Image: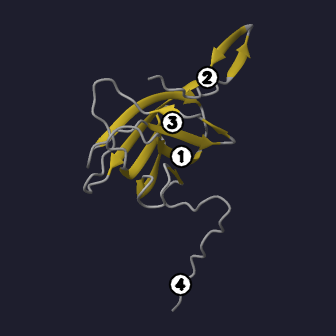
Amino acid sequence: YQRRVREAVVSTQSTGGRVENSLTKYSVAVKTGDKFSAGTDANVFITVYGAGKDSGKQALVKAGENLFERNQLSTFDLEMADLGVISKIRIEHDNSGVGASWYCESVAVTNNTSGETMNFVCREWIDKKKGNKQLFRVLWPEGRKAEGLEEEEEATEL
């Protein structure tokens, strides 16, 4: 079984006749919820969006580890083009395996160069039969509204 994953576009810049790849290291931490049958055996992917570009669909894999189990934190190191300020992510799976249903609690993405971490709360099923019956979720950083929505007024009534 061979996965086809679109690779991240690597930005390059010319410096004195030589070309350098400008890849940035990111850490991704995915928390599976603490619910009955929350874990998944499916292949999980993430796309990270920021500053008018995206990472492309990145497989979240680690050889020899049982990932995305109930109440487990699964961590990954990825090299991608520098995305600047991260605006949203798309987390998804391919519905493969016997136990494909998955309850994703949250995702944290850290730019290891800048040290900036963006937290994304999911707390939803990613499943064909539960929740919104989709195999993906688009998540915005915790404390920020979805693109295109107006900011809430912070006025309080007395």
The mark found on residue 103 in the picture is none
Q: Amino acid at mark 1?
A: Arg
Residue at the far bottom: name it: 158
Residue 137 place in picture, x, y as percent: 51, 52
Give the secondary structure at mark 4: loop
- Marks 3 and 2, Cα distance to the nearest angstrom? 14 Å
Give the residue number, with chain letter if any, for mark 1: 90
Badge 2 crowding class, 10 Å Cα cut-off, few under 14, some 14 to 19, many 20 or more, is few
Which of the two residues, 85 or 126, is positioned nearer the viewer here? 126
Pointer 2 or 1: first along the chain? 2
Which of the two residues, 156 or 95, is positioned nearer the viewer here? 95
| Quadrant where the image shows the N terminus | top left
| Left or right: 12 as drawn, with respect to 96 | right
The mark found on residue 114 in the picture is 3
The mark found on residue 156 in the picture is 4
Pointer 3 or 1: first along the chain? 1
Give the residue number, with chain letter if any, for mark 2: 22
Q: Amino acid at mark 3?
A: Ser
